[in-house]
Image (cartoon, helix red, strand yellow):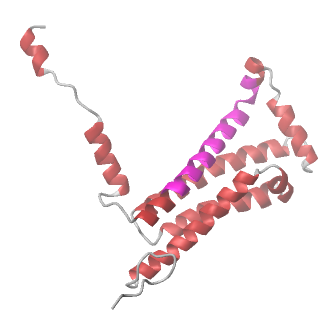
Amino acid sequence: MDEEEVKSIKFQSPVPLLLQFRNFVFGKEKPDIFTRLTFNINTIIWITFLLWSVISYFTINSREMVYRFKGIPVEKIIKDRGVELGFEGSDFLSRLLTFNGVAIICWGIVFFGLILLFRKKKQFIYFVLGGTLFYLFMSIFYLSFTYFLEDMTLYDKLALLIIIVSSIIHSYLMKNEREGGSINFFGEAEAIE
């Protein structure tokens, strides 16, 4: 290559493409601070649940490989826990695999709701609550109430409560804002005369 060709080749930064993608997904306008706070907290919760569901799904799905390389009998551990919870044979294993697969879909729906929350669309509540409540009811009714009580951590229960309650409160405050009020948790600010 000669010197002129080297000078004509420029480094193409991916930043403009990422900014365009961000603007496409989240919009160009930043919402108010309470909306951003609710969005950030719920996004952190969403990431932890999505990662846990993906890791669980692939670990259960590749349990034989884990046993071959690490010597950890994942299948036996899950079957034994299933028997303790009242399931027969490998029924718990297949239910846990199905649960984690459906959970990945549920958390995808919740993420779509979080995008709508950031854009301040009133429909966000249906996606966030729909995905979260389906995940919660599936853990209680499809796996078992004992599984919910004993195998779900306190973090899981509190995080689900936070995402549900914060979404309901934010939906109410957005309704108040659409009717001419403001997003203010403590009621209308009185005008000083």
Residue at point 44%, 60% (across, down): 36
Q: Which of 59 and 158 is in front in this view?
A: 158
Farthest front residue in view: 193
Residue at point 54%, 56% (across, down): 41
Farthest bottom residue in view: 193
In the picture, measured across the screen, residue 104 lies left or right of residue 153, that is: left
Farthest top residue in view: 1
Residue at point 66%, 35% (across, down): 58
What stretch of residues is rendered in magenta?
40-66
Q: In which quarter of the image is residue 73?
A: top right
In the picture, measured across the screen, residue 134 lies left or right of residue 13, that is: right
Q: Quadrant of the N terminus?
A: top left
Q: Is the magenta stretch mostly helix, strand or loop?
A: helix
- Residue 105 x, y percent position in the rendering: 59, 51
Q: Is residue 135 visible?
A: no
Q: In this view, does 120 lie above or below 63?
A: below
Q: In which quarter of the image is residue 91?
A: top right
Q: In this view, does 163 lie above or below 86?
A: below
- Residue 178 x, y percent position in the rendering: 39, 80
Q: Quadrant of the C terminus?
A: bottom left
In the picture, measured across the screen, residue 92 lies left or right of residue 125, that is: right
- Residue 158 x, y percent position in the rendering: 69, 58
Q: Nearer the viewer, residue 5 or 170?
A: 170
In magenta segment, residue 48: yes
- Residue 75 x, y percent position in the rendering: 82, 33
